[in-house]
Every structure is written in structure tokens, then in C-alpha cells.
Image (cartoon, helix red, strand yellow):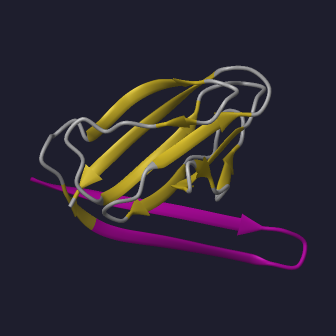
């Protein structure tokens, strides 16, 4: 099954203004997306499990209104920080390669993160 994806970004400041729309098609085996859905991320590093994971694109969204969540690949048993999910968004879109384990850690208090993946 293919899912059509479009993302529009508008940037406006005193000296810069542009708009960009990106389109793409992502194949996925489950119409609701593959992935754990909503997970609670504790203040300690934790592996994120995907039920029937094959490499693909995923969207990470922090639903917590006040706390940040770090995410990144697992290397040598620990997370290598790659990015931060700000409180309430914006979502991060990443593409995971085969054999990589995603880890997350809340910086202050446990947070709920929505994870949707489109398996390739």
C-alpha cells in the first residue's frame, strides 16, 4: 500500500521569506502505519520497539506540553543523541536504516511520544 505524503514549510522573517512543498509516496504494509504508536518515554534511556519493523521513514511527535525528549541511535549500549523533540512539536521525520536501534530519553519527566512508521 502506498501513502501520499506532502509537507509544506513557510519561513517568514524581516529579511527572508520562502515556501517549499515536498511531495512523496511511501509504501507501508499496515494502513495505520507500522510502529508502536504512543509510548511513554522515561527519564532514562530506553530502546523503542517496533512490532514488525523493516527500515523506513518515521515521524516522532512529543505530546508533552512542557518537557523535551532526546532521541538517537543506540551505539555501544548507549544512545548517541541525534535530536530533540520539543514540547508539543514540531514533529521530527527520520529514516531508519536496517540494524539500528532507536533510543529515547525524556529530559525532566516521563513524556508521551507518538511514533508512526512507514515500512519500506
Please say if 78 is above or below 80.
above
Magenta stretch, overall SS: strand
Q: Quick check: 39 left or right of 86? A: left
Please say if 76 is above or below 42.
below
Percent position of residue 118, x then y: 27, 51
Comparing 25 with 51, the one in front is: 51
Instruction: Say if the magenta span includes residue 69.
Output: no
Say which residue appears at 36% left-offset and 36% top-offset: 49
Percent position of residue 40, x then y: 53, 22
Which image quarter: residue 2?
bottom left
Say which residue appears at 47% left-offset and 25% top-offset: 39
Comparing 64 with 21, the one in front is: 64
Comparing 40 with 100, the one in front is: 100
- Which residues fall within the magenta stretch? 1-24
Instruction: Say if the magenta span includes residue 23.
Output: yes
Percent position of residue 80, x then y: 64, 57
Amino acid at each position: 500500500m502506498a501513502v501520499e505524503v506532502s509537507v509544506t514549510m513557510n519561513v517568514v522573517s524581516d529579511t527572508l521569506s520562502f515556501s517549499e512543498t515536498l511531495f512523496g509516496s511511501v509504501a507501508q504494509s499496515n494502513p495505520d502505519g507500522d510502529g508502536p504508536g504512543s509510548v511513554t518515554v522515561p527519564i532514562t534511556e530506553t530502546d523503542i520497539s517496533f512490532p514488525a519493523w523493516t527500515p523506513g521513514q518515521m515521524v516522532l511527535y512529543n505530546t508533552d506540553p512542557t518537557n523535551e525528549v532526546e532521541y538517537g541511535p543506540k551505539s555501544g549500549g548507549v544512545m548517541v543523541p541525534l535530536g530533540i523533540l520539543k514540547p508539543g512539536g514540531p514533529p521530527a521525520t527520520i529514516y531508519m536504516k536496517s540494524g539500528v536501534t532507536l533510543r529515547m530519553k525524556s529530559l525532566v519527566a516521563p513524556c508521551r511520544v507518538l511514533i508512526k512508521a512507514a515500512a519500506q
